[in-house]
């Protein structure tokens, strides 16, 4: 259960907070602890002190193999507004306003993957319906493959609708180890994570474990997430971190 191959929600010094570790430092550390794949997902440019558009444009030139492991270069883009959703997932254009992300499509399409998340400096918490709509609008973007920390207690959501949208738009919901940490700042998240895991198990839909490590310290650390997974007897075959090949197959499937 504990032999996982990848961690794709991580941040270097370029995200502008909590660490001075460079991408090279992080790759060296990931290789040293036996990961096969590391994903670097710096915060989008609207988060204060994060990197600008030119940083993300330059990632197209970054090597995909370093120090014996595969490296993916992505972004944790910021959801900026809610959009308006009319409740029919089959009609994928049934909206009056698209939710806004802080990276343009022409940059996101050059990245290996994109995560979408809500952060207070960019998106103030709103009602359960508005927060849910915002996530769904983000999922509609063809370059968004993962939703960051959907357990955040500051942003209440309708998890049934969120799960339905994730399956419809082929997006992963993550279980964020940082959220579950005693030092976490997203409020009481355990019940939210249990709801996500219950729905993934119900629909046999994969889940992604994420360290959300800022720097080297917590790369590949899913200890709090694993405690919850064992408590719930969640099936290991639904955890994408078990297989780099399975994760790549998920990314390669068209939305």
Image: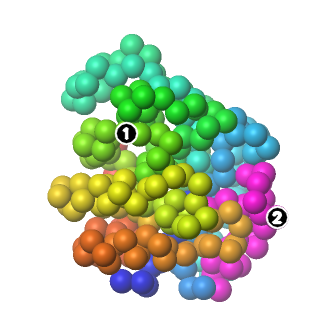
Q: Position of residue 165 (x, y in %)?
A: 30, 39
Residues marked 1 and 2 touching at CB (< 8 Å): no
Q: Residues within 10 Å of mark 2 (few under 14, many from 20)?
A: some
N-terminal of the pair, mark 1 or mark 2, is 2
- Secondary structure beneath dot 1 equals loop
Kindly tell me whether residue 8 is visible in this rendering: no
Q: In the rendered view, does 82 fall on the left or right side of 255?
A: right
Task: Tell me where the magenta segment starts and ends, as one range.
Answer: 10-32
Which mark identifies residue 20?
Answer: 2
Quarter in which the N terminus is drawn:
bottom left
Q: Does residue 170 belong to the magenta stretch?
A: no
Residue 157 - label:
1
The part of the image, by quadrant, that contains residue 51 is top right
Quarter of the figure that contains the C terminus:
top left
Residue 236: percent from the left, percent from the top? 29, 76
Q: Residue 58: percent from the left, percent from the top?
A: 73, 48
């Amino acid at each position: 259960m504990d032999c996982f191959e990848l961690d794709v929600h991580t941040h270097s010094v370029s995200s502008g907070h909590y660490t001075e570790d460079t991408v090279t430092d992080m790759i060296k550390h990931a290789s040293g602890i036996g990961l096969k794949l590391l994903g670097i997902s710096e915060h989008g440019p609207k988060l204060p002190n994060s990197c600008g558009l030119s940083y993300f444009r330059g990632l197209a030139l970054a090597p995909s193999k370093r120090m014996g492991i595969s490296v993916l270069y992505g972004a944790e883009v910021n959801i900026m507004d809610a959009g308006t959703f009319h409740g029919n997932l089959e009609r994928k254009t049934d909206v009056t306003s698209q939710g806004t992300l802080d990276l343009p499509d022409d940059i996101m399409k050059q990245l290996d993957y994109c995560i979408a998340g809500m952060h207070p400096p960019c998106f103030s918490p709103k009602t359960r319906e508005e927060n849910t709509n915002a996530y769904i609008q983000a999922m509609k973007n063809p370059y968004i493959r993962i939703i960051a920390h959907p357990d955040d207690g500051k942003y209440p959501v309708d998890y049934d609708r969120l799960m339905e949208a994730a399956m419809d738009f082929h997006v992963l919901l993550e279980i964020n180890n940082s959220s579950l940490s005693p030092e976490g700042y997203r409020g009481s998240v355990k019940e939210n994570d249990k709801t996500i895991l219950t729905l993934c198990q119900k629909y046999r839909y994969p889940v992604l474990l994420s360290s959300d490590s800022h720097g080297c310290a917590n790369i590949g650390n899913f200890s709090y997430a694993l405690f919850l997974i064992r408590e719930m007897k969640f099936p290991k075959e639904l955890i994408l971190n078990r297989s780099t090949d399975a994760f790549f197959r998920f990314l390669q499937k068209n939305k």
